[in-house]
């Protein structure tokens, strides 16, 4: 779930139980609008579930096209361990979603 705030910040969340080894359930970032496109970046910090120690961060850049309440685009992920060393990525994925609305 992504929340795009009017001030250009964003919040991202996924189920905490989604990763059995590390906790990576919350991300924060920024976004900008360029016509029907949205570009941005967000970062999440990861911790070892057993020791509760910092193990790294995950950085995601994305670009979306918005059409009404539907968006589609791409995201690239890079993963960093302690010491700011890249340990994974870049990995690409496709994003598709629908705006949450109250009826």
Image (cartoon, rainbow, N blue to C red):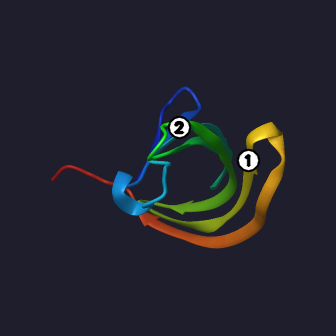
* C-alpha gap between disc 2 and disc 1: 23 Å
Residue at the spot x=37%, y=51% of the render? 16
Q: Nearer the viewer, residue 1 or 48?
A: 48
Residue at the spot x=46%, y=48% of the render? 23
Residue identified by numbered label 1: 81
Residue 66 locus on image (x, y percent): 55, 60
Residue extending furthest toward the front: 51
Residue identified by numbered label 2: 10
User: Alpha-carbon neighbours of circle 2 within 10 Å: few (<14), some, or many (≥20)?
Assistant: some
Q: Nearer the viewer, mark 2 or mark 1?
A: 1
Residue extending furthest toward the left: 103
Residue 62 locus on image (x, y percent): 68, 56
User: Alpha-carbon neighbours of circle 1 within 10 Å: few (<14), some, or many (≥20)?
Assistant: some
SS assignment at label 2: strand
SS assignment at label 1: strand
Sequence-earlier tag: 2 or 1 = 2
Q: Nearer the viewer, residue 41 or 26?
A: 26
Residue 49 showing in the rendered view: yes
Residue at the spot x=49%, y=40% of the render? 51
Q: Nearer the viewer, residue 13 or 6?
A: 13
Q: Are marks 2 and 1 in contact (CB under 8 Å)?
A: no
Residue 90 locus on image (x, y percent): 79, 65
Is residue 21 toward the left or the right of residue 61 in the image? left
Residue 5 locus on image (x, y percent): 48, 33
Picture quadrant where residue 56 is located: top right
Picture disc at residue 17: none
């Amino acid at each position: 779930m992504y929340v795009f705030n009017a001030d250009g910040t964003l919040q991202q969340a996924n189920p905490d139980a989604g990763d059995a080894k590390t906790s990576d359930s919350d991300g924060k970032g920024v976004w900008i609008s360029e016509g029907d496109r949205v570009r941005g970046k967000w970062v999440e910090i990861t911790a070892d579930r057993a020791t509760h120690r910092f193990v790294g961060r995950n950085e995601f850049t994305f670009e979306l096209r918005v059409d009404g309440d539907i968006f589609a685009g791409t995201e690239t992920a890079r993963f960093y361990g302690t010491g700011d060393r890249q340990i994974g990525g870049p990995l690409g994925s496709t994003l598709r979603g629908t705006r949450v609305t109250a009826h």
